[in-house]
Amino acid sequence: MPSKLTTLFSGNISRRQFFRGTGGFIINHWLLSILPLGGAGLLGWAEHDTLKLKCETWDLFYPQLPNALEGKTICQLSDLHLEALRIAPELITQAAMARNPDLLVLTGDIISTRTDLDKVNTYLGKLSAPYGKYVVLGNNDYSHLSHTLLKRYLKQFQGLGWIPLLNQASFLTPLNLWIIGIDDPATAHDDVDLAYQQVLAAKTSPAAPQNPPFRLALAHSSDCLDDVARYGADLLLTGHTHGGQIRLPGLPPLITNTYLGDKGIYEGYHVVNNIPLYINRGIGESVIPLRFNVPPEISFFTFHKGSGQPKHQVSDAK
């Protein structure tokens, strides 16, 4: 996983068509064909990587950080894919709560099917944070839900204390922090102009804070980054790629489903178009219920005033 700052692409990156169907077919049949050849050892490796949840901890430094954010920690979860998830909800809850996060965010692909609605409470109901819990949706959240069930899904989040942000922003006055939620870019639900509307209006308000607020943007996929860069963000948290989910040692993943992934940016912390970007590997799996050389993760970001480089540590969830 990249752990050092990467600055790339000073201009906008053109979108290239990615053959998702072909890529998915190749990856599925590649893994299914090599597992019998590799035997128990290879399957055991994949099982270990699928279930071994990692905690990725980052210390981030900002010269103009609002004083209220000094030492505050955000916990990010992404891509639970509850239809096939075998990591126990107790482990996820314990790992997330062990660091006492001040804020919780969830960046999409929680479910894939209607039956997963019954699992949401079990996995998300015991998570808490003093400054709130915020969620944006991903492509799989939209895949099999009617408009009626989508409303029920959003009400279910609200009943658990999670605040959905679908091209909306919320200002946390005690932290001098905007949370800007961008709806799923992978299914063209994103409207970054709309998401930033309140942020822009507040800048011209007589009641605007004297010190510039911190802008935390959330989206399922990094494919909205060009538009986010037009408005600016101090941190953009995304998921969707699963870090490739299956990756031979020393080689890039075969499929990441993002245009930045085509450029080699598919997990971890980077700076792209002047936007600090984090791509979370997620917790669950899609299509194949296995990970290979790409363990699941929960990520934590602690803010500090200063100009230092990001600091990164990895540990096993306990």
Image: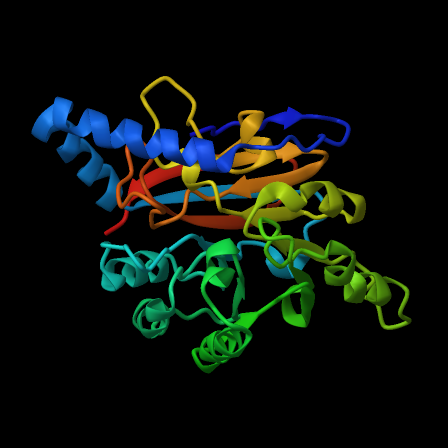
Q: Position of residue 111 (x, y in %)?
A: 40, 62
Q: Is residue 274 left or right of residue 206?
A: left
Q: Check the image and report above or below for 7 versus 166.
A: above
Image quadrant in which the N terminus is located: top left
Residue positioned most to the top: 250
Display coloring: rainbow
Q: Is residue 46 left or right of residue 274?
A: left
Q: Is residue 138 left or right of residue 192?
A: left
Q: Check the image and report above or below for 180 versus 3.
A: below
Residue found 26% across the figure and 41% down from its top: 290
| Residue 309 shows in the view | no
Residue positioned most to the left: 40
Q: Check the image and report above or below for 110 versus 156.
A: above
Residue found 77% across the figure and 28% down from its top: 11
Q: Position of residue 237 (x, y in %)?
A: 56, 49
The total of numbered circles placed on residues is 0
| Residue 85 shows in the view | yes
Residue found 65% across the figure and 26% down from its top: 7
Q: In the image shown, does 6 or 82 lie closer to the viewer?
A: 82
Q: Position of residue 198 (x, y in %)?
A: 78, 67
Q: Is residue 264 left or right of residue 109?
A: right
Q: Position of residue 168 (x, y in %)?
A: 68, 66
